[in-house]
Amino acid sequence: MRSENQTSVSHFILVGLHHPPQLGVPLFLAFLVIYALTVSGNGLIILTVLVDTRLHRPMYWFLCHLSFLDMTISSAIVPKMLAGFLLDSRIISFGGCVIQLFSFHFLGCTECFLYTLMAYDRFLAICKPLHYATIMTRNVCNFLAFGTWLGGTLHSLFQTSFIFRLPFCGPNRVDYFFCDIPAMLRLACADTTINELVTFVDIGFLALTCFMLILTSYGYIVAAILRIQSVDGRRNAFSTCAAHLTVVIVYYVPCTFIYLRPGSQEPLDGVVAVFYTVITPLLNPIIYTLRNKEMKAALWRLGGRKDVQPH
């Protein structure tokens, strides 16, 4: 009977974001524009780095990975949300829900590891510039990037299997706009105390460890920057690092708010989730291009214009 209960729910209904019916079309258009800008902006970063040989360095290689992750995270969530706004198509199959939850946590965890790796790369470049080229070789760079994807895969496999080992026998209305751990735990026909504890410990430990490593790296980086004699050198180093640190804070704060409270049912959770699933992937290319002179110059070259030299 337990096996039958686990498969008694064949589909789920995504309630989505709570909004008045008359706002369906405006919300559809708004999220459609955001999604289009996210895909095009991150795609432009990838294209620029691949085409411009001056950007064939580890920092921009990792930035390509980040842009690809942002595109795929948004693509795993937003299209279904758009269908709900316009077509009122809120049904997602059981298998589709499993795939969506796995994809989101696989990509999100990989991004978490990647932020840590990018901080380590900046630490080596600024604090150990004479050894940077010998440490961060092409093979090492590829190995570390592969490690972030492998880590994200293993983490998501664990979380997804641990969630869907629970029986789901009804109700099947997901009070959220996508299949995620807190929302799915509320639908399980069993005690979820252990799941909530494991989610808190696992994601909390992972996020805290990565965040502390990032802060440690930037502690050394700031100390090294303050020792730079050149004003322009300090400004360039701070500009590059500020972009990365801004993205890290924008990513970690909303995630911590959601996943360190797995049993929460506050309406604000949906708004916060929109921020890190929809808004953050849009902000990343804007932050990195506006605060990075090399990237801006490469975009000018890609457009067929001469570099604009800063005065």
Image (cartoon, rainbow, N blue to C red):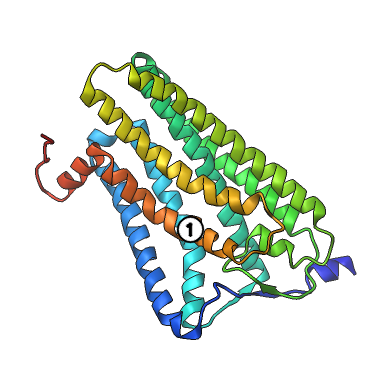
> Pointer 1: what residue?
275
Which image quarter is the C terminus in? Answer: top left
On the picture, is 111 further left or further right than 225? right
Residue drawn at x 47%, y 26% as measured from the top left: 217
Residue drawn at x 25%, y 24% as measured from the top left: 233
Give the residue type that dot 1 points to: Phe
Using the image, determine if residue 12 lies above or below residue 306.
below
Using the image, determine if residue 217 lies above or below residue 90.
above
Tag count = 1
Q: Horizontal and vertical percent for residue 276?
A: 49, 55
- Whether residue 183 is visible to the viewer of this picture, yes or no, is yes
- Whether residue 106 is visible to the viewer of this picture, yes or no, is no
On the picture, is 182 further left or further right than 24? right
Q: Horizontal and vertical percent for residue 290?
A: 27, 45
Using the image, determine if residue 195 lies above or below residue 31.
above
* View extreme (bottom): residue: 22
Task: Identify which residue, 27 or 7, lies in the foreground.
Answer: 27
* View extreme (top): residue: 130
SS at circle 1: helix
Residue 307 figure quarter: top left
Neighbour class for label 1 at 10 Å: few (<14), some, many (≥20)?
some
Residue drawn at x 33%, y 61% as measured from the top left: 37
Which image quarter is the N terminus in? Answer: bottom right
On the picture, is 126 further left or further right than 72? left
Q: Horizontal and vertical percent for residue 205?
A: 66, 38
